[in-house]
Amino acid sequence: MVKITPSFEIEVETIDNDHRRLVDFTNQITAAIDDQQYAECARLVPDFIALSKRHFAREEALLDKFDYPGIDQHRQHHAGLDDKMETMLTLAGRVEDNRLARETLRREVFFFLMDDVINEDMDFKKFLVDARSKEK
Amino acid sequence: MQGLHMVAVHHAYGSTAVLNNISFTVPAGELVCLLGPSGCGKTTLLRIAAGMERLQAGSVIIDEEVVADATIHVPPEERRIGYMFQDYALFPHLSVLDNVTFGLFRRDRVTAKERAMEMLDQVGMARHAARFPHMLSGGQQQRVALARALAPEPRLFLLDEPFSGLDTGMRSRVRAETLAVLKRNNVATLMVTHDPQEAMFMADRIKVMGANGLILQTGAPADIYHKPVDEYVAHLFGDMNMFEARVEHGQLISSFGAIAANATAEGTIVRVLIRPEGMTLSNTDGSNTDGGGPQGGGALVDILSAHLLGNSSLVRFRVRDGINGGAEFHVRVPGSFDLTEIGPIWARVDPDHIFLYPLV
């Protein structure tokens, strides 16, 4: 069970809300695998991916607005996740009859959430918090 | 959330920053490897997680407990962490069994002994319980160190180059056994190594660290190997073949044929890196000296040398003609390479093993 504690908050409402929803999806996908609800798992993963892409777009717009110096790098990071998202979609289609697909999907979803989304966003936390407080 | 979380960790020695805003997660049951050269900060990160180094900025969380941040520092002995270092640090005056029970001081003697024997059985050392460390081989001592570290059921396990002291043959075996025991015990494991092959074998996730205190790339071993983000990461897995070329009409021209330049801008000069195992050699009649399947195109080459390395050979060749004419490359082929092979040899490249990096 994944939980977002204050240490993981970026302290920007839109980003933290997206992160919480992604955490909910991750927990639901894991629960579906554990409960052998494979059809449910296959339904959840595309929604998880779609939310991730919308989150990336919102995030890039926000970073662009405040002229974040590392925005090109962060955009590149998001673009580099396309393969991982495709992999998760492929795995979701195989969970019913493939134990390795289930284990791999569980791992991929977790690491995607924690490393590729939340931990990666820590890079710009201070910048964004400072930029928004100056705006006020 | 079970496991280790390092959040926005920053560390400096004097005015020299060795860790720059590092964040990562090691979930229970997974092994994450920090891979990088000496001095990149990987051991410092390990020491911060262990509590042996005071956290300067950021936070360290183990199983949802904040063990270090700006105001908190839980000492190492209270973090419920297991360690395994290169030198094992077994107590020479204690038997194998007593070494393993040493850390079980919170249990009564009977349950401590039962737990110790259970762990020794897991690592295949139960029948050596009465022996002393000096009577054991390096691999056996490593197994005892593993049992001792896992006996107290730590919530985090830290390994710092644990296999470096073992000879090559023993290292592979002990590595595999260690990984099996760690997975069986479902503990979050953070490992430090400078050996890329070791990282590839052991890790669920690899974090490549550079000399600037940053994580350069994170991913599953296959991601790091097949999609290195830059030349430094690509070179981690061994010598690469290299040449420079300009992107024209979406591709690069080489003696091996046209190479797709993907999304690289027209006119960009790129460095082309090709893994030795990403090339194949074949005869003019279409059969293969290396047993692999031929790809399209190819360059006529002269073989310069071949060195048998065991189950593969490293073959050096020079391209005869074309834009790479005169350049030397090396290719890894399965088995032996027959230098007396009569007739022309063609070298081809596998697009999956070609990496393009724009020159700055």
Image: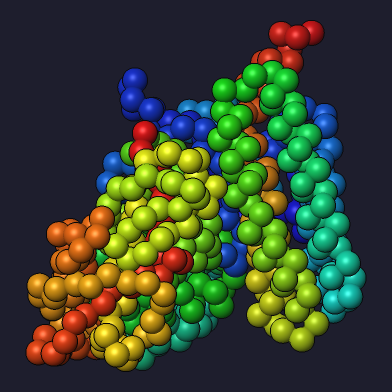
Using the image, determine if residue A82 lies above or below residue A130: below
For the point 69% across and 24% down, which residue is it? A64
Of the pair B173 and B325, the residue shown nearer to us: B325
Residue B66 is situated, as x and y percent measured from the top left of the image, at 63, 41
For the point 47% across and 57% down, which residue is it? B260
For the point 59% across and 43% down, which residue is it? A77
| Figure quadrant of the C terminus of chain B | top left
Of the pair A105 and B335, the residue shown nearer to us: B335
For the point 26% across and 86% down, which residue is it? B283
Q: Is residue A103 left or right of residue B179?
A: right
Q: Is residue B305 left or right of residue A102?
A: left
Please state the total of marks drawn on the protein image: 0
| Figure quadrant of the N terminus of chain B | bottom right
Instruction: Inspect this view and state whether residue B42 appears.
Output: no
Instruction: Inspect this view and state whether residue B322 appears.
Output: yes
Residue B317 is situated, as x and y percent measured from the top left of the image, at 16, 70
The type of colouring in the image is rainbow
Of the pair B239 and B75, the residue shown nearer to us: B239
Residue B38 is situated, as x and y percent measured from the top left of the image, at 27, 46
Residue B70 is situated, as x and y percent measured from the top left of the image, at 57, 27
Using the image, determine if residue A127 lies above or below residue B197: above
Q: Is residue B129 left or right of residue B263?
A: left
Using the image, determine if residue B248 lies above or below residue B318: above
Of the pair B136 and A52, the residue shown nearer to us: A52
